[in-house]
Image (tube, rainbow, N blue to C red):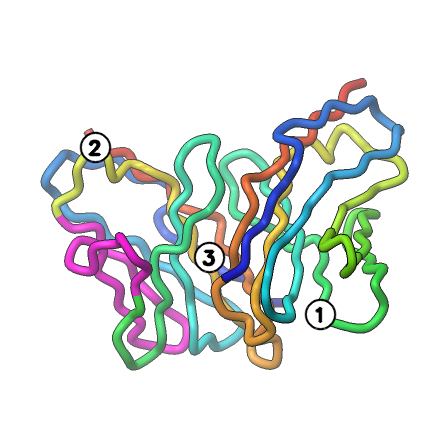
Amino acid sequence: AQSVTQLDSQVPVFEEAPVELRCNYSSSVSVYLFWYVQYPNQGLQLLLKYLSGSTLVKGINGFEAEFNKSQTSFHLRKPSVHISDTAEYFCAVSDVNGNKLVFGAGTILRVKS
Amino acid sequence: GAVVSQHPSWVICKSGTSVKIECRSLDFQATTMFWYRQFPKQSLMLMATSNEGSKATYEQGVEKDKFLINHASLTLSTLTVTSAHPEDSSFYICSARAPGQQETQYFGPGTRLLVL
């Protein structure tokens, strides 16, 4: 079985500053990794995913994440955040069959002006 | 592409009544859809996997007789909360897999259920 740990429940940051949202996973098998964003009272939007190949994955809205197998991490980064990036971000993992998507507890990103 | 819709977006009902929530894949056919529940300030928890033309697979602890799932077509899955009680109040979100992207789930906008 897979599990996901998002180390920060909330991350406050000033507008135009860089941000990193941390995610660590645990699995005994090969995995796929995902980051989703959820705006208030809305469903989840896929930001990016890692399936295989290059460990640096670029997504929408200027976000990127790096898969680190030795550290079992998949941290999300953005070099310069905007007020509109304020939302909750979920890291998720599945096996390579795409079954059983398991979510972390989420990290609320608060961008301040 | 890969748009998933849900209806209704929110519903308020009396305790003891049943509520049906629809999940539709708008621009693709989905043989598999998923139903999640999200309580306030918590993450998503998978309730069941819905397969077109066959019975749904429920996660441990989810009552199949209370949460009826029907996946009668390749673009529609429904979740019926039977005899709803206040503890069933939650945010219900569905997702679907797009053809050729079996590893990725695309999520609907969610349905907020409040049982009085």
Up the image or down, B31 lies above or below B58; here it is below
**What residue sits 81% from the left and 43% below the top?**
A77
Determine which residue is flagged by label 2: B86
Q: Give the structural element (helix, strand or loop) at label 3.
A: strand
Q: Is residue A64 shown in magenta? A: no
Determine which residue is flagged by label 1: A51
Q: Give the CA separation, mark 3 to mark 2.
A: 25 Å
Report if the CB atoms under discs 3 and 2 are less than 8 Å apart.
no
Determine if marks 3 and 1 fall on one subunit. no
Please say whether residue B66 is visible from this viewpoint. Answer: yes
- Say which amino acid is labelled 3: Ser
Task: Indicate the chain on which mark 1 is placed.
Answer: A
- Say which amino acid is labelled 2: Pro
Task: Indicate the chain on which mark 2 is placed.
Answer: B
Q: Which residues are magenta?
A: B58-82
Percent across and percent down for residue A3 are 55, 53
- Say which amino acid is labelled 1: Leu
Residue B5 is tagged as 3
